[in-house]
Image (cartoon, rainbow, N blue to C red):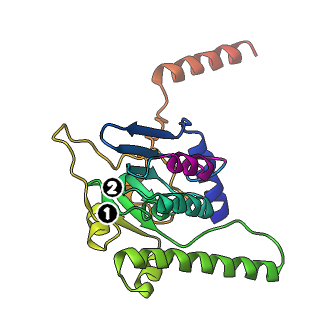
Amino acid sequence: MKTQKLLQLLRDNAQNERKPLNLVRNEDAGEATLYIYDVIDAWWGVAAMQVAPAIAALDPATTLHLRVNSPGGDVFEGRAIRTAVQQFKGKTIGHIDGLAASAATTIVDACDEIEITEGGFYMIHNGWTVAWGNRNEMRKTADLLEKVDQAIVADYAKRTGLDVAQLAKWMDEETWFSSGEAVEHGFASRLATLPDKEPSNSTDCKWNLSAYAKTPKALVAPAQPAPNNEPDPAAVRAHNERRLQVLQFA
């Protein structure tokens, strides 16, 4: 069931409008902004092959703003993007504009500073995969997943200074942090300062997050209203009249 939900997440999210990698340069200000507003995946969304060359081409004196709104995706693709961010010699600032979940946290965590918009969410959990084979092959896969999780925990611990056991427990439980909680626990440096405009709901979410067990209600698409099953009186009357006509000529 978990595998089916994971594949459904990728398929549904892939049906969203595909957007090219959007790197915006502001050379006068010495800044560049890279948007990762998609699934992290080489086939279904944002790929390391897109991101790494774009970052490598930037002037090292540039300040890179990495803006993220993503439900996560492939852990190794996320790791490759993370490496590209870490290797950039300029200053990096991560902006969680809505959601940073799963592999998306691995990417934004590579930045020197992280700010999260009020109403945003940050989610950590254990790695998943799709596997088949005999018991020995399954054990090898489980061992690999354990190593992946340990590497992710080490990343979080380095940033937050929190106890590894506590971080591992949060990952076991699939933990969703509100923007305030993300700052409180050190996953983010600060809340984002927004311009004084009409308020917007940053928790609006287009993603299918059904693969995750504990998605906050604020991120779940509202249920569609149940269809009105009350019969239409005029239709019922017309149907009965037709039945009477058939009986009369039977």
Residue 136 horizontal/vertical position (percent): 81, 83
Q: Residue at x 63, y 47 (%)?
A: 44
Q: Toward the viewer: 66 or 220?
A: 66
Label 1 neighbour load within 10 Å: few <14, some 14-19, many 20+: some
For the C terminus, give its image quadrant: top right
Residue 160 horizontal/vertical position (percent): 35, 76
For the N terminus, give its image quadrant: bottom right
Q: Quadrant of residue 26?
A: top left
Task: Report the residue that reaches farthest toward the left.
Answer: 196
Question: Are the residues tagged 2 and 1 within 8 Å (C-beta)?
Answer: yes
Q: What segment is highlighted magenta in the picture? A: 43-58
**Residue 88 at least partly seen:** yes
Q: Residue at x 40, y 61 (%)?
A: 111
- With 134 as the anchor, is 76 left or right in this view? left
Against 52, residue 129 (above or below) is: below
**Residue 136 drawn in magenta:** no
Against 222, residue 165 (above or below) is: below
Q: Disc 1 marks which amino acid?
A: Ser
- With 200 as the anchor, is 66 left or right in this view? right
Against 129, residue 77 (above or below) is: above
Residue 30 horizontal/vertical position (percent): 34, 44
Q: Residue at x 39, y 86 (%)?
A: 163
Residue 182 horizontal/vertical position (percent): 32, 67
Against 116, residue 159 (above or below) is: below
Q: Residue at x 83, y 73 (%)?
A: 133
Residue beneath label 1, please? 178
In the rendered structure, which disc, 2 or 1, sits on the residue that comes first in sequence? 2
Q: Toward the viewer: 62 or 1?
A: 62
- With 222 as the anchor, is 15 left or right in this view? right
Residue beneath label 2, please? 120
- With 3 as the anchor, is 164 left or right in this view? left
Per the model, the C-alpha gap separating discs 2 and 1 is 6 Å
